[in-house]
Image (cartoon, rainbow, N blue to C red):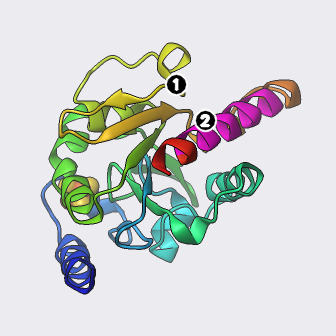
């Protein structure tokens, strides 16, 4: 385990200097994954947001806070899971003093996969839960993901790992009204529980 932890640290250092795609130019820093090296459950989001970019840690902004609430409700200890993103730099468009989130394109997601592949090969989780379509596309290699049909079911990933897809917490935050947000949150909790059960 100590060797895997050291390797993970070294990969994170390597990723800090990554310039494989243009996204590093407009971001503060690489936001690598974090969590126990042999976590049974790995959660993969899309990319760091504004606050994650500044803090250098995944899931610390509004979506991260919603995820924390969902994890607590699902009975999952955040300290026991590995959290990361499909893309390691914050893709954004400056608009006045704000930086607006932009979804990474296929090229950026594919080229950044080198890092998540390394994380997966070192952590070797029992189950990988993709949060949202971008993460699901990255992990499955498929262009089309129909979240409403596929969420919550165990799927085989091309690398042999077991996966599952669910909604991204930021999609819940963007839902138009409180009723939709409540339903979205309940769905996320349900999928987190299913993922944790399969991870063991
Ligand atoms: S987004 Fe990924 S591939 Fe692109 S520069 Fe950042 S770490 Fe490298």
**Any magenta on residue 185?**
yes
The residue depicted at 20 percent of the width and 48 percent of the height is 113
Is 15 or 105 nearer to us in this picture?
Answer: 15
**Any magenta on residue 99?**
no
Residue 61, above or below 73: below
Rendering coords of residue 105 (x, y %): 29, 35
Image position of 9 (left or right of 130)? left
The residue depicted at 26 percent of the width and 62 percent of the height is 119
What is the quadrant of the N terminus in the image? bottom left
Residue 187, above or below 127: above
Contact between marks 1 and 2 (CB within 8 A): the answer is yes
Rendering coords of residue 37 (x, y %): 35, 72
Q: Quadrant for residue 98, please give it.
A: bottom right
Rendering coords of residue 116 (x, y %): 26, 55
Residue 5, above or below 120: below
Label 2, residues with CA under 10 Å away: few <14, some 14-19, many ≥20: many
Image position of 180 (left or right of 82)? right
Quarter holding ligand 1: bottom left
Q: Which residue is mark 1?
A: 151
Q: Earlier in the sequence, mark 1 or mark 2?
A: 1
> In this picture, which residue range is highlighted in magenta?
181-195
Rendering coords of residue 91 (x, y %): 38, 50
Instruction: Report the disc number at residue 191.
Output: 2
The residue depicted at 16 percent of the width and 75 percent of the height is 14
């Amino acid at each position: 385990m100590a060797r895997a932890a050291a390797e993970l640290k070294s990969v994170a250092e390597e990723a800090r200097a990554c310039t494989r795609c243009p996204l590093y130019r407009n971001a503060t820093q690489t936001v690598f994954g974090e969590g126990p090296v042999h976590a049974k459950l790995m959660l993969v989001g899309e990319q760091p947001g504004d606050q994650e970019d500044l803090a250098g840690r995944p899931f610390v902004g509004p979506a991260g806070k919603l995820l924390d609430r969902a994890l607590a409700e699902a009975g999952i200890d955040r300290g026991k899971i590995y959290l990361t993103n499909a893309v390691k730099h914050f893709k954004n468009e400056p608009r006045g003093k704000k930086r607006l989130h932009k979804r990474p394109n296929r090229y950026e997601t594919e080229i950044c996969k080198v890092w998540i592949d390394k994380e997966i090969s070192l952590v070797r989780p029992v189950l990988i839960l993709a949060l949202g379509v971008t993460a699901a596309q990255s992990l499955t290699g498929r262009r089309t993901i129909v979240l409403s049909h596929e969420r919550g079911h165990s799927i085989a990933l091309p690398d042999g790992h077991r996966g599952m897809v669910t909604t991204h917490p930021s999609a819940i935050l963007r839902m138009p009204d409180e009723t939709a947000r409540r339903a979205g949150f309940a769905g996320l909790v349900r999928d987190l529980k299913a993922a944790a059960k399969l991870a063991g």
